[in-house]
Image (cartoon, coloured by chain):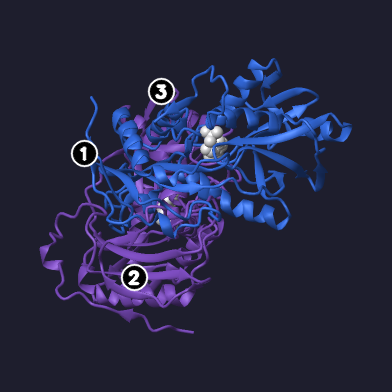
Chain colours: A blue, B purple
């Protein structure tokens, strides 16, 4: 069943007011947004309408109980003006995994894809060509019912908003391995893109920033001996020529980019180990010179090399490599994302 | 410094449309609400205005990252028409403890108390006399800035909304001791009234409800061997004549009612142990007949007796006692809350 999406267009686009050479991340939104309400036990007819404020009762559950989930994905434009997405089905499946854990009704597949396609065609001028340029897409679902009893809401809103993004000059990122604070518990919601997981990281991250680290690598809450993931990236370690990353579990987000890195490593006969990563072994490898790289993987920056890390009062700088795995994976992934003549053997690129 | 609160009154109150004999919890709100914005690094002039919808950008941080905290308190009316609060300073301190953990700017004390007093005087007719009747007060703070970068917002809203509440007929509550799911991690935000802590409980609670349990008693995330607290209540166990409750820590909300119960127990020379409570010892005590009572403590129900519990496929019924500790504490606390001729030796009752 494919649905007709009702479209209400803006009278005049604001695109000419936007400086695409200087885009702050996530502050500027396109002309339209996708909105669909869950009422009377069903997702209603979705609509695309001019981007603008939401009206919600002050007692809406999302304000009080964080019953909210989101996704992050990107659209790219190739040299032939095709609009491309990268493995969007993964994001579709994941938002429903997140929703289920947060007791939010799952969203229908055809609404999601029809909504996305219609919206992206409408906003096609906001997607700029050129490696690094993209349109960041933010699907999200919130509990909108106005009633503060601590139980799942009756009403929800599923929305998609879009923000143009640029490849920005990357600062060097140094990370702190967490020794006290945690991101999630066994049996908790760490594997979900639940809103509350993110707000909870701001304070510990601000403390790390005061110590000169831009981000935290979270460790397991029980012992703080195992490295898990960063705030919005999964984490890879390269010791010698072996790539190591933590297994996904109920504390760690099963990142799309992470899955691609693992697949590309296997495609290229690299040694990959998916296993628990001890803080002690990484420090040991840094000391004996076998630790070559640490990098993060995630939709926002694709691959983010880490320049150094801190733990237990010690700080470590990582070598600056000529042919890093980080840049190898980043180029491979961007070749597929921008459709630049590579063989997309896994069918990751999705033409809208 | 005491601030003048600007008050914008409704033209006509909706109080006559409300059936105070049948109040659903948390769905009906009074005529006015308190609102204060944090912009340009400061809390601005607060205002009390007609209760009504909020307008927020779809990219407001609260929707995406759960940067939000709240409090729950109640106002009572005594036989002389005095409006009374119960230890409101505790709630004031706690919302700032929560805010700090969520990287939300702390709220000034005079704004909080002046706002509360002005609002309650305005809504005095909504507070009905009679034991069990109250006005539930919900202060909360949300990140309102429209921008989806994963970092603390620049702008916030602090609000207070009020909902009339009734002493409702209490169903028997049976609880499930959690074996798989968890509420919070060491080093996490469990001690804060962070919005995301609550939405995360809805799904596991719905699974427990399918098994015939109304609520979950959360156990420690690492081993699930120790009992911590319920979704919106702290938990007490009575073995023989000894009252036992878990110590507050960074996973457990430091409940105001819990503190009062401990104080009242000490005042009345009861044996109280504040220590970790093993699941195994509670099951053992249930089997050998020494487990007398389990009850929850929290602002909503004051004291909530538990009729039975389940764990590891076994279910246990608790004895129905004539002179339970639960009803002893409930009466004592309500005597102070409704100012019914008792000596409020600790000064918990606060006249507005
Ligand atoms: C906690 C967390 N880990 C990892 C990631 C990376 O996932 P993906 O590669 O799917 O963007 C994200 C961002 O989406 C995240 O929020
Ligand atoms: C998680 C949690 N535990 C315990 C309580 C009880 O705290 P208080 O007695 O302060 O209402 C509450 C409710 O406020 C709560 O949300």
In the displayed structure image, the side of residue B78 where residue B342 appears, left or right:
right
- Frontmost of labels 3 and 1 is 1
Q: Quadrant of residue B277?
A: top right
Please, what secondary structure does the residue beneath circle 1 have? loop
Residue B247 position, x and y percent, is 56, 48
User: Nearest the camera: B126 or B282?
Assistant: B126
- Frontmost of labels 3 and 2 is 2
Name the mark on residue B337: none
Please, what secondary structure does the residue beneath circle 2 have? strand
Q: B95 above or below B288?
A: below
In this figure, which residue is indicated by the disc labeled 3?
B314
Labels 3 and 1 share a subunit: no
Residue A33 position, x and y percent, is 33, 47
Residue B323 visible? The answer is no
3D distance between C-alphas at marks 2 and 1: 35 Å
- Frontmost of labels 2 and 1 is 1
User: Nearest the camera: B74 or B239?
Assistant: B74
Report if the CB atoms under discs 2 and 1 are less than 8 Å apart: no
Residue B29 visible? The answer is yes
3D distance between C-alphas at marks 3 and 2: 48 Å
Name the mark on residue B34: 2
3D distance between C-alphas at marks 3 and 1: 46 Å
Labels 3 and 2 share a subunit: yes
In this figure, which residue is indicated by the disc labeled 1?
A45
Q: Give the class, few, some or many, for how many residues have Cα within 10 Å of label 1's Cα (few <14, many ≥20).
A: some
């Amino acid at each position: 069943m494919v649905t007709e999406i009702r479209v209400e267009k803006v009278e005049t686009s604001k695109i000419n007011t936007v400086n695409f050479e200087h885009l702050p991340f996530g502050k500027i939104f396109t002309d339209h947004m996708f909105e669909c309400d869950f009422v009377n036990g069903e997702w209603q007819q979705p609509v695309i309408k001019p981007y603008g404020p939401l009206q919600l009762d002050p007692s809406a559950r999302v304000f009080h109980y964080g019953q909210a989930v989101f996704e992050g994905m990107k659209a790219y434009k190739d040299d032939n003006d095709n609009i491309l997405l990268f493995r969007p089905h993964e994001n579709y499946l994941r938002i429903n995994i997140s929703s289920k854990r947060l007791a939010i009704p799952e969203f229908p597949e055809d609404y999601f894809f029809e909504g996305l396609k219609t919206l992206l065609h409408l906003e096609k001028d906001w997607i700029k060509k050129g490696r690094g340029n993209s349109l960041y897409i933010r699907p999200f679902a919130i509990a909108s019912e106005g009633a503060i009893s601590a139980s799942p809401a009756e009403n929800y809103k599923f929305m998609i908003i879009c923000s143009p993004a640029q490849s920005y000059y990357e600062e060097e990122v140094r990370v702190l391995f967490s020794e006290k604070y945690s991101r999630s518990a066994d049996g908790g919601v760490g594997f979900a893109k639940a809103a509350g997981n993110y707000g909870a990281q701001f304070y510990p991250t601000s403390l790390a920033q005061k110590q000169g680290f831009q981000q935290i690598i979270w460790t397991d809450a029980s012992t703080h001996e195992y490295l898990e993931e960063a705030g919005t990236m999964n984490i890879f370690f390269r010791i010698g020529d072996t790539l190591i990353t933590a297994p996904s579990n109920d504390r760690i987000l099963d990142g799309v980019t992470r899955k691609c890195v693992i697949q590309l490593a296997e495609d290229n006969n690299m040694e990959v180990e998916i296993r628990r990563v001890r803080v002690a072994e990484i420090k040991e490898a840094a000391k004996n010179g076998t630790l070559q790289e640490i990098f993060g993987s995630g939709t926002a920056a694709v691959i983010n090399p880490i320049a150094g890390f801190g733990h237990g009062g010690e700080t470590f700088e990582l070598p600056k490599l000529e042919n890093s795995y980080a840049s190898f994976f980043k180029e491979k992934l961007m070749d597929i994302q921008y459709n630049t003549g590579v063989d997309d053997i896994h069918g990751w690129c999705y033409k809208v």
